[in-house]
Every structure is written in structure tokens, then in C-alpha cells.
Image (cartoon, rainbow, N blue to C red):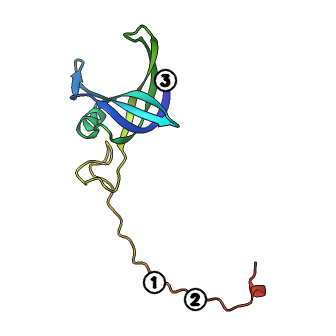
Amino acid sequence: MQKIILWGNVGSVDDELRHVGDKGSAVFGFSLATGKKGVTTWYRITCWGQKAEFASQYVRKGERVNVVGDLELREYTSKAGENKIQPEVRADEVNIAWTKHDQGDRPYNHGQQSPPAAQPQPQRQQHTKQKWAGNVDEIPF
């Protein structure tokens, strides 16, 4: 398997969090579109455990997210009889890309429960323009 880092927009999202296996492991999936210069590549993202619980609560269609995980290429035959390859990623990390328009009711990533606090900005001092009255030959460079 290959490690991959993706930035993209969420497409379809599973309807609900599922629990599978004897231990009832949580699993959740969504599709992610990445692209460059008019070419879009769709990835199927699968999250397990706590990452699945996080994704099921906060990942929504159209959301900009960052995914880090293991890449696998799955081959299948479409309904039209064409051989296709579907890139799939088992997510190790899922991070939501925050914008200044986001509200504070959503976590930053699967490890933090709130977006990073805004740092207070220091007061800027007022600067006045001053004309330089020196000789160009006095400049040391």
C-alpha cells in the first residue's frame, strides 16, 4: 500500500455510521473529488473507529477536507462492461478545512473538539511618511 495525502471536496456521503464485525467496529465512507486543470479524480474514502464517528458527524457534501491514508486501487467491471479502476483510501486522518465563514460548532479535526482559537492581534502603531532629505551617495549599499 502507498501512503497518500489528499485535499479535495466531499461528494457523496454514506447515509449513516455502520457497525461491522464481531466487535461492532464503526465504519463510515464518503467520496472525495480532487482535480487539477479540468481533470477530476474521485476517491472512495473509508474511515474506521473514532475517525468514522468523527466523519459521520461532521463531514458533509461540498466540504473541503484533507485526508491522509493508505491508497489501494480496486479493479471492477462497470454495468456497461468496461474495466475500471477505483482509487480507495483507508483514512488515517480526516481534517476539515476551516474558512473564516465557518461557525464554531464543529471540530477542527478528529483529535480536537473545537477550531483553533483566534489569536488577539496586537495594536498597530500609526506610522507617518517622512521624506528622506539625504544624499544618494550616502546610502551604504
Is tag 2's residue or tag 3's residue first in the polypeptide sequence? Answer: 3
- Residue 6: image location, x then y, percent: 45, 36
User: Which residue corresponds to the image point at 30% horizontal and 30% vertical from the top-left?
Assistant: 12
Q: CA distance from mark 1 to mark 3?
A: 56 Å
Q: CA distance from mark 1 to mark 2?
A: 13 Å
Q: Are marks 2 and 3 in contact (CB under 8 Å)?
A: no
For mark 3, what is the residue? 1
User: Which residue corresponds to the image point at 46% horizontal and 26% vertical from the top-left?
Assistant: 71
Q: Residue furthest top?
A: 81
User: Which residue corresponds to the image point at 25% horizontal and 48% vertical from the top-left?
Assistant: 106
Q: Residue furthest bottom?
A: 133
Label 3 packing within 10 angstroms: few (<14), some (14-19), many (20+): few
Q: Is residue 5 above or below residue 131?
A: above
Q: Quadrant of residue 140?
A: bottom right
For mark 2, what is the residue? 130
Q: Nearer the viewer, residue 116 or 77?
A: 77
Mark 1, secondary structure of its residue: loop
**In the image, which is nearer the foreground, mark 2 or mark 3?**
2
**In the image, which is nearer the foreground, mark 1 or mark 2?**
2
For mark 1, what is the residue? 126
Is residue 30 shown left or right of residue 132?
left
Q: Nearer the viewer, residue 74 or 47?
A: 74
Q: Quadrant of residue 70?
A: top left
- Residue 137: image location, x then y, percent: 78, 86
